[in-house]
Amino acid sequence: MFWAMGKKTNIKAVSLLIGLKRRLDKTSAIHKASLNKIAKVAGVSPNTIKVYLPIWLRLGLVEWRGKHKDVFVINRLSSKTRHRNIDISRIDMKDFKTIYENFRSFLFLLVLSCKGFVKRMIQIANTSDDVEEVKMALKSCNRYARRNQNKELEYVDYGISYWKIGQKLGFCRRTAEKVVKFACKKHWCRKYNNYEWWSMPAVNGMYVEGFTFTTQNYGFVAHANTYKLNRNIGMALIEGKI
């Protein structure tokens, strides 16, 4: 699913294809296919299929088969590499819009799940006796780790900003906020706001350089939010296959 990231149109295209594949069940094919016939099965207009069909073909997600090239076939959407897949069983398949809202939030969860990989690398770096394995682990987790008083590596969560989330998924900052809000509302993850604050008597909300905002008696500096995956989501996220 990593190839869906980075472009809004790609995410929309894959969302529509997920819904279409679910409606086709195990066949994954439409015989004597046309734009109208595909659109009828997908529950969208022919113009919508006309927009996304070239993207499906470009990404290798579908192909035309048969002697007359009139059999529309959806290729395998899951990767043979297990950790690159996500479990979409929790995605509401009501309609295209609903699938899109769910799927883009799941991609956000996939971004968050990367810290689980970093934690595993830190564990290897702290416990492994294999020199090469330790070198590989240190290289993978160096940016997100620091040494504690016992000289052992520990994970440091610097958080991730809305701007960075949008950059990874191909959205603007405002849309990234909506994606996060949707995921939190579904209880797929929990958001933690991070602020530093100082006592500033009688500042009364005035602008102070170096501070994000002020209140009546305090000045605040906002840092990137941190997130924690729902335990069940965290365990199932990369287990499933489409």
Image (tube, rainbow, N blue to C red):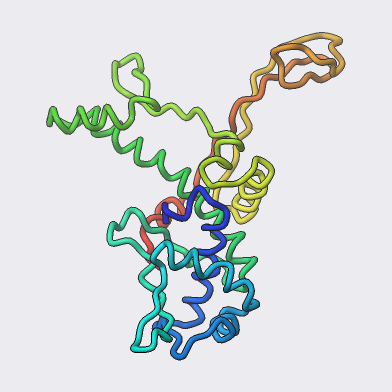
User: In the rendered view, would you say 155 is above or below 15?
Assistant: above
Residue 146 % position (x, y) = 37, 20
Residue sitting at the far left: 130
Indicate the quadrant containing the N terminus: top left, top right, bottom left or bottom right.
Answer: bottom left
Numbered-mark total: 0
Name the one closer to the observer, 242 or 37: 37
Identify the residue at horizontal 79%, vertical 19% (top origin). 214
User: In the rendered view, would you say 126 is above or below 60?
Assistant: above
Identify the residue at horizontal 47%, vertical 76% (top origin). 21
Q: Quadrant of residue 113?
A: top left
Residue 194 % position (x, y) = 61, 28
Q: Quadrant of residue 26?
A: bottom left
Name the one closer to the observer, 16 or 229: 16
Name the one closer to the observer, 197 or 77: 77
User: In the rendered view, would you say 4 is above or below 17?
Assistant: above
Identify the residue at horizontal 77%, vertical 12% (top origin). 208
Identify the residue at horizontal 77%, vertical 15% (top origin). 218
Residue 182 % position (x, y) = 64, 53
Residue sitting at the far front: 68
Residue 135 % position (x, y) = 20, 27
Indicate the quadrant containing the C terminus: top left, top right, bottom left or bottom right.
Answer: bottom left
User: In the rendered view, would you say 237 is above or below 217?
Assistant: below
